[in-house]
Image (cartoon, coloured by chain):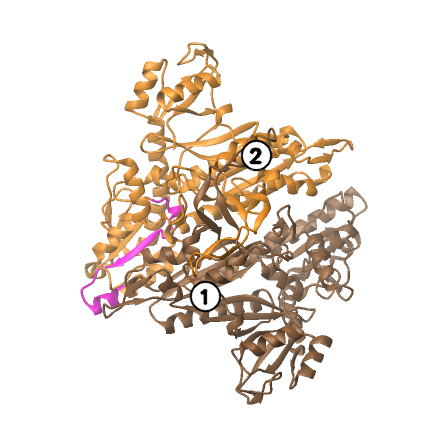
Chain colours: A brown, B orange
Amino acid sequence: MSKKLTSRSEDYSKWYNELVVKADMAENSAVRGCMVIKPYGYAIWEKMQAELDKMFKETGHQNAYFPLFVPKSLFEAEEKNAEGFAKECAIVTHYRLQTDPDRPGKLRVDPDAKLEEELIVRPTSEAIIWNTYRGWIQSYRDLPLLINQWANVVRWEMRTRLFLRTAEFLWQEGHTAHETKAEAIAEAELMNNVYATFAENFMAIPVIQGLKTESERFAGADETYCIEALMQDGKALQAGTSHFLGQNFAKAFDVKFANKEGKQDYVWATSWGVSTRLMGALIMTHSDDHGLVLPPTLAPNQVVIVPIYKSEEELNAINEVANDILKDLRSKNISVKYDNRDTQRPGAKFAQYELQGVPLRIAIGPKDLENGTVEIARRDTLTKDIIPLSNLIEVVDNLLAEIQKALFNKALDFRDAHITEVENFVEFKSVLETKGGFISAHWDGTNETEEKIKELTKATIRCIPLKNKEEAGVCVYTGKPSKARVLFAKAY
Amino acid sequence: MSKKLTSRSEDYSKWYNELVVKADMAENSAVRGCMVIKPYGYAIWEKMQAELDKMFKETGHQNAYFPLFVPKSLFEAEEKNAEGFAKECAIVTHYRLQTDPDRPGKLRVDPDAKLEEELIVRPTSEAIIWNTYRGWIQSYRDLPLLINQWANVVRWEMRTRLFLRTAEFLWQEGHTAHETKAEAIAEAELMNNVYATFAENFMAIPVIQGLKTESERFAGADETYCIEALMQDGKALQAGTSHFLGQNFAKAFDVKFANKEGKQDYVWATSWGVSTRLMGALIMTHSDDHGLVLPPTLAPNQVVIVPIYKSEEELNAINEVANDILKDLRSKNISVKYDNRDTQRPGAKFAQYELQGVPLRIAIGPKDLENGTVEIARRDTLTKDIIPLSNLIEVVDNLLAEIQKALFNKALDFRDAHITEVENFVEFKSVLETKGGFISAHWDGTNETEEKIKELTKATIRCIPLKNKEEAGVCVYTGKPSKARVLFAKAY
């Protein structure tokens, strides 16, 4: 398979698919819509997990684990939630295979092993968790209940794409219970903030925090907060959501508590999640025609060292220098790999690490040994420099910080250059087709108008930004009055 | 619910079930056979995961993620494996729910959304993984392939018990591919060793490494290595297994590679796993009638500090001392919790931490403030001591190390005292019924005898210990010649 990628300008979607596979991040599996996350991709996901997990624990959350399956009677208890996910459920109906009498050595479903009640493979866990919380919550002393779960979920999507939309995906889902409405709203906002901080500081992805419109809300939520990012092709990507669930699940599952006055009341809830979809956001924010570009925080190897040699003797001398560098970098918690495989030529190694987005590449040849230098190459800018060995560690340290910052700023500049205020529908359509990105426009606040605009342009309201300033105006489509702008975009 | 546990001597099984629930480790869910792992139990599992993950990575393995579902045609490809798991499979047959015309607002399975091919919820992932490996392995340069997965699996067990046997459980499964038979065997042995080291050094659980007999082998394996532990009630528990799979899966999924001579050959395989079952082993190795006893390595909190006070003023003075201790202990990487909740009395706190197995409890009262002391209580021995504040950190540090060692030694003494050599079947049955534990006996090496003994006594051959010395003897049941002893026991 050729390592050369289709360019982004040629076919962005093809570029993405090729990159995911060629950079060894993920591939399609034998199961329709389900992916295999390969070791390199999984190592990046593990870094996201570790950081998020730390942030969740720092904000007082604990992890737990709930069943994969949801009995149908529980699944349907919260009607809006059930309705929202009913069309994409994998359903377990039987619990045994038997020898197939018609195909020797093969198996068939045992018709006698039918479950009394069908089990839904969780598309999200509110139902099974709230059914459990009923036993955990009696009084205000049991609140708040702040729990997170790392899990796989299944949504039977018809059109799937690696990381962005897969039938099975990995995610975390927080599920919290509170005494008051205000506390639950504060929690939903807090976790949306955690997601925004994570996206910006750790993934170097600028995001806009906002509220979803009613039609884009999570099924069963009273309010959905979100972080929205902008991809290089001008399409938006919802990178995380945090829901204020009101008392909907508490009522559906009869979860009451005795408040401080001794009166029974339904508890208030939130749920919030991010998924392996973030891998897609990562790729489409930073990468280029040469392959993946990784912020140093997420790179399984932040630095790779490649020896350039012609003889065993030269290699031995380089090995010595390289081992010192390894030791020094590791002592500074910089992850580094020394690739002295003799089955690959330096050019092939360079190409591989470029494709896989290793932030810094150090090459050491005989000339460098003579001069006490190394060659250092930045993946993000594709620039090279000759550096004296004596201050290599400092240079690496500074460069990694600089790359992290540069990636964020580059993405921020791009994003900000792609938020366009428009005042009428002609302009709306024209900007959407020529430039893409977020369109900041007035909207009359009705589902009907939102639906109509979507039908005509494929653009949806990504969010009502939290930082919106009030501004009187008229709806870009109906001309009716509006108090503030919302952000439209085509979206993943 | 009373916090008092049934005693172990009264009813060991009841004691176990109560302990798991009352110590907030896990509980049954609304889904038959599936458990909820509660935050306290999950925090212990996270510590196991972190240590195992580190050990896997240190031995060159990488994590990846494969689909939850296995299409039936892949599932049945390796016949022995398929046959072994066919009777306990959850099977997905449909992918959509629809409104139930007979029950307004409720749902039913949409009969038009039947899958073309049924999907098995993975009971283990050899099939889906080996089907994927076919695309990853072309030449000896791609080998060894050393991959691990953290995942949930489902085995539709009819009789379930929290942690020990549940329909869904969490585990890790390693799946490796090698050029030669010798390398694959070495890998299977290495990972069994890793498990033994983990069990003994980290969980303080002594284990015997051995080989399974043919009838107890993993379905599809040529050889199964295992670690076997002994529980307090004299029953054995298989704590981990590592399988040499020969070329069975490579042949079933046509995974060939070009060797160094350029000839095509099937690759050699291993798989190995441990699961949340280890939580059961942990509980039944160390705990007592007062509740959980945790080795310090696995305790979510190694130390808890409880203030004893009558006035706000006393509490303030204690807070000050406690905060200094917290800081000092944390700087030594000792996890510590300060419980100054005013909703609970000290007695209730003591009972809770005893039940939850916190290794060390520090109590600070007004007398201690005067004297510059604290009271320190060990959970494993239930002993208390008064310690001068000035060398508290050193004492805590030493005690934690001592507890870890003491728990292992206590378990080892118990285990060693419960390995009994027997020479005939009368003795065999008598020891099994009166004393329990491992019975070291000669066996003629046939499935038939093994089966007969199981039928008569419920004891199975737990393993053929790797450290067996050759010793001529006669089978305890048939009197036929035998070259070495094997270990029998009743088992979980």
- As drawn, the residue found furthest toward the bottom would be A472
Residue B159 is situated, as x and y percent measured from the top left of the image, at 38, 37
Q: Are marks 2 and 1 on the same chain?
A: yes
Residue B415 got which mark? none
Residue B452 is situated, as x and y percent measured from the top left of the image, at 41, 18
Q: Can residue B315 be found in the magenta stretch? A: yes
Q: For marks 2 and 1, give the one nearer the viewer.
A: 2
Cα distance between the residues tagged 2 and 1: 40 Å
Can residue B446 be seen?
A: yes
Q: Can residue B465 be found in the magenta stretch? A: no
**Relative to B368, does residue A449 appear above or below in the rendering?**
below
**Relative to A294, does residue A26 appear above or below in the rendering?**
above
Residue B317 lies left or right of residue B285; in this view the side is: left
Subunit under mark 1: A
Subunit under mark 2: A
Q: What residue did someone put label 2 on? A: A107
**Residue flagged by tag 2: what amino acid is it?**
Leu
Q: Quadrant of residue B289?
A: top left
Q: Earlier in the sequence, mark 2 or mark 1?
A: 2
Q: What residue did someone put label 1 on? A: A220
Estimate how packed mark 2 is, as few (under 14), some (14 to 19) or many (20 or more) residues with alpha carbons within 10 Å: many
Residue B237 is situated, as x and y percent measured from the top left of the image, at 40, 33
- Observer-nearest of A341 and A90: A90
Can residue B189 be seen?
A: no
- Observer-nearest of B119 and B13: B119
Quadrant into which the C terminus of chain A falls: bottom right
Query: Tag 1's secondary structure?
Result: loop
Residue A264 lies left or right of residue A63; in this view the side is: left
Query: Tag 2's secondary structure?
Result: strand
